Amino acid sequence: MIQKVYTKIESIVGNVIQVRATGVRNSDLAEVTTASGKSFANVIKLDGDLVSLQVFAGAQGVSTGDSVRFLGHAMRVSYSPALLGRVFDGAGRPRDKGPALDENMIEIAGPSVNPSKRVIPRRMIRTGIPMIDMFNTLVESQKLPIFSVSGEPYNELLARIAIQAEVDIIILGGMGLKYDDYLTFRSTLEKSGAMSRTIMFIHTAADPTVECTLVPDLALAVAERFALDGKRVLCLLTDMTNYCDAQKEMAITMDQVPSNRGYPGDLYSMLASRYEKAVDFDGAGSLTILGVTTMPGDDVTHPVPDNTGYITEGQYYLRGGHIEPFGSLSRLKQQVNSSTRSDHRALMDAMIRLYASYKDTLEKRSMGFQMTDWDEKLLKYGALFEEKLMDLSVNIPLEEALDTGWRILASCFEKNETGLKSSLIEEYWPKDES
Amino acid sequence: MSVDMSEVRNRGRVVSVNSNMVNASFEGAITKNEVAYIHVGDTRLKSEVIRIRDGVASLQVYEMTTGVGVGDEVEFTGELLSVELGPGLLGQVYDGLQNPLPQLAEQCGFFLQRGVYLDAIPDKDWDFTAIAKPGDQLEAGDSIGWVPEGAFKHSIMVPFSFQGVWTVKSIVLSGRYNVHATLATVEQGGQERTLSMVFDWPVKKAVGCYDERLMPDEPMVTKIRIIDTFLPVAKGGTYCTPGPFGAGKTVLQHLTSRNADVDIVIIAACGERAGEVVEVLKEFPELVDPRTGRSLMERTIIICNTSSMPVAAREASVYTAATLAEYYRNMGLNVLLLADSTSRWAQAMREMSGRLEEIPGEEAFPAYLESRIAEFYERAGKVRLRDGRTASVTIGGTVSPAGGNFEEPVTQATLKVVGAFHGLSRERSDARKYPAIDPLDSWSKYKGIIDGKLVGEAYDILRHGNEVEQMMKVVGEEGTSLEDYVTYQKAELLDAVYLQQNSFDPVDYAVVPDRQRDIFSVIHSALMADFDLEDKAAARSFFNTLRQLFLDWNAAAFDDPSYATLKQAVVDAVEGKRR
């Protein structure tokens, strides 16, 4: 097919340009050449011969006389082992000093996995963090966001999990990242020796908005291929709120009717089609997605965390420097925590229930009420729980964390105050302290 | 759902593309809501005509529209979006358009390739037993015979679309026939039609073909204590389960789909996680249905249009599920349809409405949201069939309200039309109190398995206990009278050992009605008892002990010898402290 070049741009609104052209197909990629350089653009709407394109580098500085050349295929990315250790931007160009890659190009944002080709996740990912391993176990092929507010050490937590988790390949998708954060990620991964199994797609806060929306698709397309080739892949996406805000910006400039706080009505579907790429393939590898969703104003009912929560398999709340026991949830933990140790589930539930009572007591105390014996016990328990298990610096294996749990209970309560089944108490209650 | 090319009445051309909405020009007459196919290269993309304006048809495309171009050919079929009905539906896993997913995987591998549409009804032979005789006068929905499908007699019925009375001219002898073979010929006013085991029905139209609708008055047991005892659901009734994310909507539905005492369960996984469907897919074939002794999968149909699958097909999936439910109902069976989640279905409507540039209603949902929701739930009901048998479709839908706030359009529209409301609360799920149904906010209009008067008395304790708890937050424990404090402890006990239920415990996850009555009688006597307790510390200690005894009793299997002993321990503890 001869690539015709169009040199009359009819309109430029936001990052969207329109040209009159024929033979163009929905989602096709085009190359826009402007005075300041070349940029890709993709077809987002067709109306007769009027073609609307979204310019990746932004439409700033685009002239009505600039040229548009359609490439006859949708957006693609190279897939090969040569990607490992490399860093790319949101349009797939190298951000490091390495060469551009154009071999074995694969389409991004491909079709959904047939649910009947998935298998039930069954492998726990050990992180050494009790609040994860014991209370909300991370499972291979899970999609899980970290809900947080700006200023919390979520990127540090993400990097720590990445390094400690036993996976073959790490793919980092950065959206609207501060340049410092990007450098931190890079140096952390390099220092731990994990960089050689890492691929980064980084959009920094200074880069064009459209490229931000491409990062998850690029990262996940590559991740999916590695998983199909039998690799266990961990994909980190930070920060998905920036991604949604970029989508909002684009939807509004295209005159879409907003549904909730300016976000487009298909925000849920948009997020779901990305997060649902997490998969454990029947007969191949797996793809686990750990994202970061910053909550504007610490409001979980904000459309981004809200929609995310309905899609993902749980969430970790990072608040005040630790993972919150309330609200944090790993939906897949039931798949694995029955085979860890017989007391795992019951102990986990009992300790959270008691911690909830401790919080009630704290409230009572702050209102100046007299503390009963029971309240005193709870206060002791809460302090121990926070120190020995919740603190993010605690780095112990699951079994040790469970033993610690029993010791905390025994040092604070009578057996029948824990709400645990007698048979479990019989087996695990520390003998020396009862 | 194959379409014979000879049925193609009309052709057209694509004139514009906007995401999954494509406009097309056409010649001749087309029908609103008919199915059209867009030809992209060698692929045919299924779509539905959702608007016709100024000679242009707007098509809602059930697939990704990547690669669609202006000028592409469009083929109009003249048929409304339909499902195929016949033996072999049970145990199947379909997408929203009744495409069988496992067969699709065999053909296309890991990914859902667009434009591939397979036969919904497996092409196989069945042992047909004829009932009708030549000369019989039959109407739509009347049975001409049956085939054994799993544990059921699958009626072969006169297609629902046949109007008036038809005379059987001929019918084959009982024997083994292919699902598509001609079994009978019927005649009406000189017009003859042949019948096989399979026929079509448009999904968006409720199936009639019964004598009358009845009051749903028989409880549908779920083996979940808080539901069966306090917030019952009736066979043929409707209920909704709204809740914020993580409150346990889906776990609750899974439990219901396993344990409900109905003949057939249809699960519509509508716009939710694929992983959750996989659990059902992999677990159900292994689980035994205590009613039939067969695998649970043999009574289940899964309609699976998960969140990453095309959004327009999500809109169709709940209707596909409802149609299959009505089909089995008309054989005299009790069917439960579980839709998870109706909010995703509503959002699919919203996305399409936005692309049609309709004037948005509240939160950008279309103005017809309420009527569509009402229409859907009204497809539930208990009916008397023409042969006198009763049958039912029960619909339970989850709702995923934005921000967990029930004051939003989908929840409110749903509450207007359902018979029971099981509202899940964030506070309860945060405190790991499962099922996280809020006992005080929720309600049911149906009759349960336990005398309403006794349940009412338990409810009073619960309500009073909650008031005391609220008051204690203000005045403190020391400012509360012993009597109030005991009421509070009673309410806590009821919550801990009866309302809460451990869905992962092999015994506690399903509690049969007889056992519920047994436990309830004991807890009711404890709630009503006047205990001899000198102070609050004694009260707390007593109720802690009582709770522990109850929990141990709950953990004992109903047929285990320890059941009686553990029950006696609870009774003794209650009686020992009675004043």
Image (spheres, coloured by chain):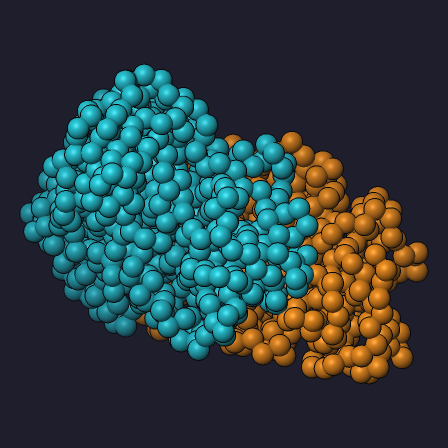
Chain colours: A orange, B cyan
Image quadrant in which you'd find residue B478? bottom left
- The outermost residue toward the front is B190
Is residue A355 in sight in this rendering? no
Along the horizontal axis of the image, is B400 left or right of B11?
left
Residue B369's place in the image compared with B207, above or below, is below
The image shows residue A404 at horizontal and vertical percentages of 53, 43
| Residue in the image at 76% along x and 57% along y | A73
Along the horizontal axis of the image, is B238 left or right of B150?
left
Q: In front here: B290 or B166?
A: B166
| Residue in the image at 29% along x and 28% along y | B184
Q: In front here: A427 or B148?
A: B148
The image shows residue B525 at horizontal and vertical percentages of 11, 44
Q: In front here: B430 or B350?
A: B350
Image quadrant in which you'd find residue B416? bottom left
Image quadrant in which you'd find residue A92? bottom right
Residue A371's place in the image compared with A15, above or below, is above
| Residue in the image at 21% along x and 66% along y | B467
Is residue B452 in sight in this rendering? yes
The image shows residue B396 at horizontal and vertical percentages of 31, 50
Residue A401's place in the image compared with A391, above or below, is above
| Residue in the image at 61% along x and 62% along y | B14
